[in-house]
């Protein structure tokens, strides 16, 4: 059996692992990345939010990604029958990026991985972690490649960026139930031959079919568009076991999009994600940290998944670097408490979306510009900005405003924050 020694081992080469590896490579750290899959691969998380751009930039990946010409995302549109609500990322409470990308993840993740390899990162595809042991100040990982060759990797720190693979949560029994109710999704891509020119054809949109059921439409620069249905698991299951039939049924429910997508074939058999929300009992331990979907995944409604992946990935990399260089790191306050602060904010907004309270704010007229700017900053991923009253008071702001709107329909409302 081969034996390798590294400073930091990263499991997973998706966005979380990529930004962690990119950052650490810039610092001259001896790292290794093992990835179970072979890229390109089809995964969800095709709509980014502006906060992630900070992470790609800091990890040295921005230029390579920008050169690919991915569709730029300047905001998002929410449709409910005749009602339209558009958020513009250039008009938000918090400072930060005003745009991001809409991306086919297969192409996006492959380019990140290729850029890491070009920079000299040791990245092994089709290599599965089959065992991890922690002893003293070191982890010992057994990884097996597609030929069946096993390698022992000794590392001073391990960052689990394995996403839905959830390597350490499975091995260390860290999984716990999500606070969100069970939801599921079905999605695929179409060749968007009916795409309108201009903003209508490029804008990401969410078409609300029922309070808890919505269709996503994410146009890409390659002429394809991602179409997906999200709803309570019972609703998704009732669409039928055949995912092609189920997604076609969902599209037929959309008065706004049925003409554009109703008769188009899917590029690949629609994928179903059942009860996707996940959580863990802790996000770190002696010699390891969990990032991205390996720790917590909420819901696709506000595209928070990749943001939490890259935020936690690059933060874990920074803290791990300090630790392997001999510093004492307070992982509870500097990592878990910090990450859970942002997760709590987004969790509130997702919960209030599905109760209908947040939708009351979206579609109330006349709009309150300050309320909208504060919420826009959250949708852009700036959920750690404690200057934003809708971050600080997230647990009651939306609920209180929705109650006020219902009590005084058609009247101007003031912020209760």
Image: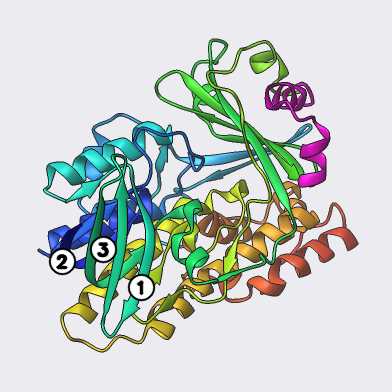
**Magenta highlight: main SS:** helix
Q: Is residue 207 visible?
A: yes
Which disc number belongs to residue 309?
Answer: none
- Where is residue 190? Give x, y as percent: 55, 19
User: Could you tell me how far apart the alpha carbons at marks 1 and 2 are, in whole angstroms?
Assistant: 14 Å
Q: Position of residue 402 (x, y in %)?
A: 79, 62
- Which SS class for mark 3? strand
Whole-number angstrom distance, CA of label 3 to CA of label 2? 9 Å
* Sooner in the amino-acid sequence: mark 1 or mark 3: 3
Q: What residue lies at 16% left-to-right and 62% top-to-bottom? A: 4
Q: Secondary structure at mark 2?
A: strand
**SS of the residue under disc 1:** strand
Answer with mark 1 or mark 2, whichever residue precedes in sequence.
2
* Residue underneath mark 1: 133
Name the mark nearer the viewer: 3 or 2: 2
Task: Judge from the rendering whether residue 99 lies leftward or rightward of residue 400; answer left or right.
Answer: left
Q: Are marks 3 and 2 in contact (CB under 8 Å)?
A: no
Magenta segment, which residues?
Answer: 233-254
Compared to 144, does 141 lie above or below? below
In the image, is 360 to the left or to the right of 100?
Answer: right
Quadrant showing the C terminus? bottom right
Kindly identify the residue that appears in the image at 63 percent across and 60 percent down. 371
Whole-percent x, y for residue 295 in the image = 50, 64
Q: Residues within 10 Å of mark 3 (few under 14, many from 20)?
A: many
- Cα distance between the residues tagged 1 and 3: 13 Å
Residue with the mark numbered 3 = 9
Q: State yes or no: residue 207 in magenta.
A: no
Q: Nearer the viewer, residue 245 or 47?
A: 245
Q: Residue at left 38%, top 82%?
A: 331
Badge 2 density bin: few <14, some 14–19, many ≥20, Cα 10 Å: some
Quarter of the image that includes the N terminus = bottom left
Q: In the rendered image, is residue 415 in sight? A: no
């Amino acid at each position: 059996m081969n034996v390798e020694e590294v400073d930091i081992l990263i499991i997973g080469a998706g966005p979380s692992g990529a930004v962690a590896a990119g950052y650490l490579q810039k610092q001259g750290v001896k790292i290794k990345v093992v990835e179970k899959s072979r890229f390109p691969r089809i995964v969800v998380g095709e709509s980014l939010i502006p906060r992630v751009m900070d992470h790609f930039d800091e990890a040295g990946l921005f230029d390579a990604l920008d050169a690919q010409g991915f569709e730029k995302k300047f905001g998002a549109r929410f449709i409910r029958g005749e009602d339209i609500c558009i958020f513009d990322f250039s008009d938000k409470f918090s400072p930060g990026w005003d745009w991001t990308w809409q991306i086919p993840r297969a192409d996006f993740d492959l380019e990140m991985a290729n850029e890491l390899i070009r920079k000299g990162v040791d990245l092994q595809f089709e290599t599965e972690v089959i065992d991890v042991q922690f002893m003293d100040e070191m982890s010992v990982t057994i990884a097996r490649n597609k030929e069946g060759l096993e390698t022992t990797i000794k590392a001073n720190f391990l960052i689990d960026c394995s996403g839905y693979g959830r390597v350490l949560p499975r091995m260390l029994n860290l999984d716990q139930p999500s606070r969100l109710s069970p939801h599921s999704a079905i999605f695929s891509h179409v060749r968007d031959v009916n795409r309108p020119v201009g903003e209508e054809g490029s804008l990401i949109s969410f078409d609300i079919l029922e309070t808890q059921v919505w269709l996503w439409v994410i146009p890409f620069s390659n002429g394809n568009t991602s179409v997906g249905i999200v709803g309570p698991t019972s609703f998704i299951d009732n669409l039928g076991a055949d995912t092609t039939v189920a997604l076609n049924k969902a599209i037929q429910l959309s008065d706004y999009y049925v003409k554009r997508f109703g008769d188009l074939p899917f590029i690949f058999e629609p994928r179903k994600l059942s009860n996707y929300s996940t959580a863990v009992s802790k996000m770190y331990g002696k010699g390891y940290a969990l990032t991205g979907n390996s720790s917590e995944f909420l819901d696709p409604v506000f595209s928070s998944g990749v943001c939490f992946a890259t935020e936690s990935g690059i933060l874990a990399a920074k803290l791990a670097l300090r630790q392997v260089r001999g510093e004492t790191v307070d992982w509870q306050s500097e990592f878990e408490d910090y990450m859970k602060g942002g997760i709590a904010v987004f969790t509130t907004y997702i919960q209030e979306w599905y109760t209908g309270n947040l939708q009351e704010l979206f579609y109330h007229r006349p709009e309150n510009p300050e309320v909208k700017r504060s919420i826009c900053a959250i949708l852009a991923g700036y959920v750690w900005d404690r200057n934003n009253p809708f971050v600080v008071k997230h647990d009651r702001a939306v609920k209180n405003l929705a109650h006020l709107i219902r009590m005084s329909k058609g009247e101007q409302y003031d912020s209760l924050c």
